[in-house]
Amino acid sequence: MEYKSLGRSGLSVSRLCLGTMNFGWKSDEAESHAIMDLAHEHGLNFFDTADIYYWGEHRGKTEEIIGNWFAQGGVRRERTVLATKVYEPMGEWPNEGRLSALHIRRALDASLRRLKTDYVDLYQFHHIDRETPWDEIWQAVDVAIQQGKVLYAGSSNFAGWNLAEAQAAAKAKGMAGLVSEQSLYNLLTRTVELEVIPAAQRFGIGILPWSPLQGGLLGGIVQAERTGRRRLEGRAAETLEKRRPQIEQYEALAAELGHKPSNMALAWLLHQPAVTAPVIGPRTTNQLLQSFSALNLKLDQQILERLDVIFPGHKPAPEDYAW
């Protein structure tokens, strides 16, 4: 396993991050625990979750599954860089969502109880809060840091100017600010290259791409359809029909090179200089094992250029659309 510093921090994390959104929902507790054990066996030390995961009436269940795994001991917690998130509503009453100081305090304590730990390595804002001022947000985080409950702060789904605003407010309070930003980023969806990635690089923020396979569209879906192994529905099916020519070209290139499409998509992200670790979401131990192959897949400049032809990206703004 390779490791990289998370943003400008001194925290070393694995080049793949284990996303746990499927835990409890698509993977039962036993399978979820087996996935985490396998991750540690291969040196993957970076786990990502959120208080809202498993959603609806089951929200918080994913954190409980992870907490039960930590409770088994065997230095599981000590070897894990644990990231969770705050923002989504955890109840129906006021102050049970967003980023007020009150909700951050309550949500963090609830996450710690479910996770059966006394601190979170990386506490991430799941979305920008357009109503709560940054002074209040950073004051709440500073209190959590002073209490030893949080070590680092990160964001998710922020715009470039949100990153800049957050860092300016943190600097004014003498705080380190954000060390990571978790964004939707993959070969099919490259909008963050306009402003989010340039801002992250300017402020020393590591990019953690979520949905690196765009919901399976970059995982060999055309071939899976032809063999009857998988069928997409809803929005994913609509996107496939819109982007089918590109995806077919992509799968043909992967076949030409002898790579699994899913591994090539992960490898492409690992070749992007701003990326710290793609967030993968295996439902089974076998899917996790397959993902490790991407770490050893090297793409030369010619292949990277061919991928850019299939899936055109963006130059940083404003050069992308102006002089």
Image (tube, rainbow, N blue to C red):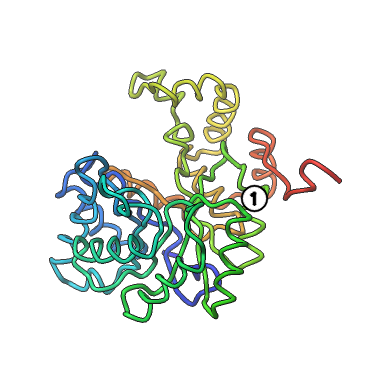
Provide the residue designation for mark 1: 300
The residue located at (61%, 69%) in the rendering is: 168
* Left or right: 321, with 101 as reference point: right
Left or right, 244 with respect to 101, comes to right
* Residue type (three-letter) at the residue carrying disc 1: Asp
Residue 125 is situated, as x and y percent measured from the top left of the image, at 43, 58
Quarter of the view holding residue 226: top left
Tell me: residue 162, above or below residue 74.
above
Q: Residue at x 68, y 47 (%)?
A: 194
Q: Is residue 110 above or below residue 252?
A: below
| SS type, badge 1 | loop
Residue under the point 34% across and 52% down: 97
Q: Around disc 1, counting alpha carbons within 10 Å, would you say few (fewer than 14), some (14 to 19), or many (20 or more)?
A: few
Query: On screen, 217 above or below 321?
Result: above
- Give the farthest residue toward the right: 323
Residue 217: percent from the left, percent from the top? 47, 31
Name the one closer to the observer, 27 or 227.
27
| Screen quadrant of the N terminus | bottom left
Percent x, y for residue 231? 36, 21
| Residue 135 against residue 199 in the figure, above or below | below
